[in-house]
Amino acid sequence: MASFSCSSSSVMGVILLLFSVLLAPARSASDQMILAACKTVGGGSTYFDVTFCLEALGSAGGSGGYQDLAAVAVDLLATNATSTEAKIDRLLGCGGVEVKADDAALARCLRSCQSLYGGIVDDGPACTAAVKGGRFGEATAILEKAAAAAKECEGGFEKRRAASPLTAEDDDAFKLAKLAVALLRFA
């Protein structure tokens, strides 16, 4: 009968390694690509982090190369802008909910944001076509304009000392535009 002389710490290390391999969730090739891309573009970004990238691209089931992932980010930006524009319409009274008459500063900010988000929505198809057509410079210019519009919208509330009902939407729009730009740099 053979006898093995292994230290208990070696055996425990092997057992832990085995459990981690067996219990680790299997990642699809798509998940692995998204993770790698997000680590590449989000790891050193001052605009968004890896978690934002993973949540955004993972929620849309993105896959493929950097160009395809940038197209997903552009689609998410278009969805965000359309949704934000509808929220602004509701806040301005187009859907029954109205800004109080004595809150002129808020109404001015919302009208300004309505115009800014209208521009993002209008530019969406051209941006999508530019990404898919490999015209990354053109797409980047459109995306940088969208990021600036989101910042301008939020800045208008700050300037007029009005509470912004669009902070989350502005933040997401800005980050999605910057994410798409970052992905295009690697496409």
Image (tube, grey):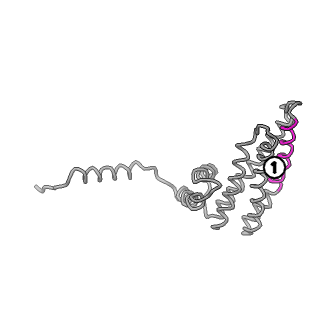
Residue numbers of the magenta segment: 104-122
Identify the residue under disc 1. 117
| Quadrant in the picture for the C terminus | bottom right
Q: Quadrant of residue 33?
A: bottom right
Q: Is residue 123 left or right of residue 6?
A: right
Residue at the (29%, 52%) spot, across then down: 13
Viewer-proximal residue among 90 and 104: 104
Badge 1, how many Cα within 10 Å: few under 14, some, many 20+?
many
Residue at the (76%, 39%) spot, across then down: 164
By secondary structure, the bulk of the magenta-drawn segment is best described as helix
Viewer-proximal residue among 61 and 154: 154
Q: Position of residue 143 (x, y in %)?
A: 75, 59
Element under label 1?
helix
Q: Is residue 18 left or right of residue 97?
A: left
Q: Is residue 89 above or below residue 52?
A: above
Q: Amino acid at mark 1?
A: Tyr
Q: Position of residue 100 (x, y in %)?
A: 86, 30
Q: Is residue 106 above or below residue 2?
A: above
